Amino acid sequence: MANIAETILLEADFGNLMHGFAVALTFHNFLFMLLGITLGVLIGVLPGLGGANGIAILLPLTFTMSPTSAIIMLSCIYWGALFGGAITSILFNIPGEPWSVATTFDGYPMAQKGEAGRALTAAFTSSFVGALFAIIMITFLAPIIARFALRFGPPEYFAIQLLTFCSFVGMGREPPAKTIVAMMLGFALAAVGLDTVTGTLRMTYGFTSLLQGFDFLIAVIGLFGLGEILLTMEEGLAFKGKSGKIDPAIVLKTWAELGRYWATSLRACLVGCWMGVTPGGATPASFMSYGIARRMSKRGNEFGDGVIEGVVAPETAAHAAGTSALLPMLTLGIPGSPTAAVLLGGLLIWGLQPGPLLFVEKPDFVWGLIASMYLGNIVGLAIVLTTVPWWAAILRVPFSIIAPIILVICAIGAYTVHNSMFDVAMMIVFGVIGYVFKKLKYPMAPLVLALVLGDSAETAFRQSMLASNGSLAVFWSNGLVGSICALAIAMLLWPVIGALITAARKGGRDKPATRGAA
Amino acid sequence: MEAQPQHARAKGDVETRWVELVVALLIAVAGLVVIQDSLRVGINWAPEGPRPGYFPFYIGVILALAGLYIAVTTLMKWRAMAGRVFVTRAQLGPVMQMLIPAIIYVAVLPLTGIYVASAIFIGGFMVWQGKYRWWLAAIIAIAICVGLFYMFEVWFLVPLPKGPLESWLGY
């Protein structure tokens, strides 16, 4: 019986998806899709503008649009930004986005050898494959997870959020103490202002501007926007780009060749999806996938000199991670990446509460978005393959013109969030924090996610505590919440466990002094 | 991006260990501020449930402890970190050349409105940093701001702060 019920439900989902395609394919929405992709690639190409802050800046422009059109445009900006990052990495050796750093390792050497077209085709196609894999996963898993999550109460929600934050500590490449600091700063900033439960003012110290608290959109624009510009200023960009023309014949030849790397692609897809759903994010996913590909490949020692697999692996994983980060955002209301967090912020502003109920209450919206993911990535692939030379030309515009323009755009973006000049000033403060934190290797993503989720995490915690009369045992009260919490604590302690294992292995052979060098 | 140990430290360079220590201590202070405010609003239980400081208090405690931990580990590695440069004087120059005009730009925004300030900022930066001729910079800067004006005020109907010039023009 249960099987039949499942089948009927899956068929209903298929119908919903088809309906979603109908929603996404209206002329109006298709236009927004094209606009979104184009803006996204532009954002991905320009330094200082990325998926997260680009969407944050453009968010206020969509307030007058219907939520479905708005999310289609915004998510297409995200796909575009994911594509755009590869262009600068390969042609200029400048990663436009953090997740395309690993693409520079082999992409730029390929461009130097005169194989820019081959590298770009490989990068775009792999991005597409990674994204497609993730979208198919979302299509099948999202309704199941959403149905499952309908049973969640406050303790389960808090446990899931705990798991999210603990995985940052366990999986991040930054020092655990710094990850914790970033996270707690986010939670602390989220607590500023009016306490929604009791109506008490917290940490405002008499400043009326602080009554609303800190908006994470301002933090995103400052941390990722101005912070990035300041870093770029320091490096003193000298663009010496390779020509980015792509011959259709090369595209076909590269496609024929890419089939041989199906195993690399598949591994990269799996790594990407895993890292995207657990909030490892696109950047660690791309590095991890590159590392795995190098270890598994027969030509492992040639990696770094311009091997096509070295482009396929990180690009596939980055896109798979970037896309699958939307799965927990849609089904649980917990974003897997800063960009997904910004999209979540948008949903809240449009009055949509992300989470399992969204699938029941707004099927049009959810399935329209999922359908637009398929279409957006197909359209995106076509756009980037045909327009690469133009984007490369934009990058030849000197930084002394681009930098002030990006700053102006960030300022406008910060202002339009709440029509507040105070926010613009805060954007500058966050920019300086972003610059210093980046140089000291404090991660930004946990800060942003904590700032977004702070209120809901606190509410879930307080409701759980209320239900249990203040006993923490509520987080072990049933199998589900208990295992999530246990997993979270394992993630939190992972750095310690890992260090102990390494220490035990090294024990006799090595002196501990060598560890300091790594 | 990796901060390589650079032993040839020039005069005026900022050392990483100092920045690391100062930032860690500031974080610890921020933690203390959170703790202090949580104590003010109450961290225990009221008849209707946990008081507003109940959750932030622990956030503050963890923040302060993590900040102190980073400060202490920095001090323990103090010798080893000698000579590692956070930012060289040559790098700090361009950063400040961006940051200081940006602060001035934000400070004058309420007076001039966003469009005039932006045009002056973009044009000025081009002449100052890019060594463009003033008329070329002026054309580009004004064109961009007129474009922004149409995009926000006319197409997307998002009003941005305007100053005397725009009100003189009738907006």
Image (cartoon, rainbow, N blue to C red):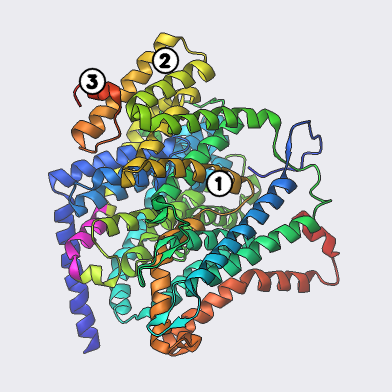
Q: Is residue A310 highlighted in magenta?
A: no
Q: Which mark is residue B168?
A: 3
Is the same chain shared between marks 1 and 3?
no
Q: Is A383 placed left or right of A281 in the picture?
A: left
Q: Residue furthest front?
A: A206
- Could you tell me residue A428's position as x and y percent? 48, 40
The residue carrying pointer 3 sits among few (fewer than 14), some (14 to 19) or many (20 or more) residues within 10 Å by Cα, namely few
Q: Which mark is residue B137?
A: 2
Secondary structure at numbered mark 2: helix
Amino acid tagged 1: Ile
Amino acid tagged 2: Ala
Amino acid tagged 3: Trp
The residue carrying pointer 1 sits among few (fewer than 14), some (14 to 19) or many (20 or more) residues within 10 Å by Cα, namely some
The stretch in magenta equals A361-372
In this orientation, does residue A244 appear?
no
Q: Nearer the viewer, mark 1 or mark 3?
A: 3
Q: Nearer the viewer, mark 2 or mark 3?
A: 3
The one nearer the camera, A385 or A83, is: A83
Rendered image quadrant of residue A489: bottom right
- Could you tell me residue A181's position as x and y percent? 59, 60
The residue carrying pointer 2 sits among few (fewer than 14), some (14 to 19) or many (20 or more) residues within 10 Å by Cα, namely many
The one nearer the camera, A58 or A212, is: A212
Q: Give the residue displayed 62% in from the left and 51% down from the top.
A: A441
**Majority secondary structure in the magenta region:** helix
- Could you tell me residue A102's position as x and y percent? 55, 46
Secondary structure at numbered mark 3: helix
- The residue labelled by disc 1 is A433
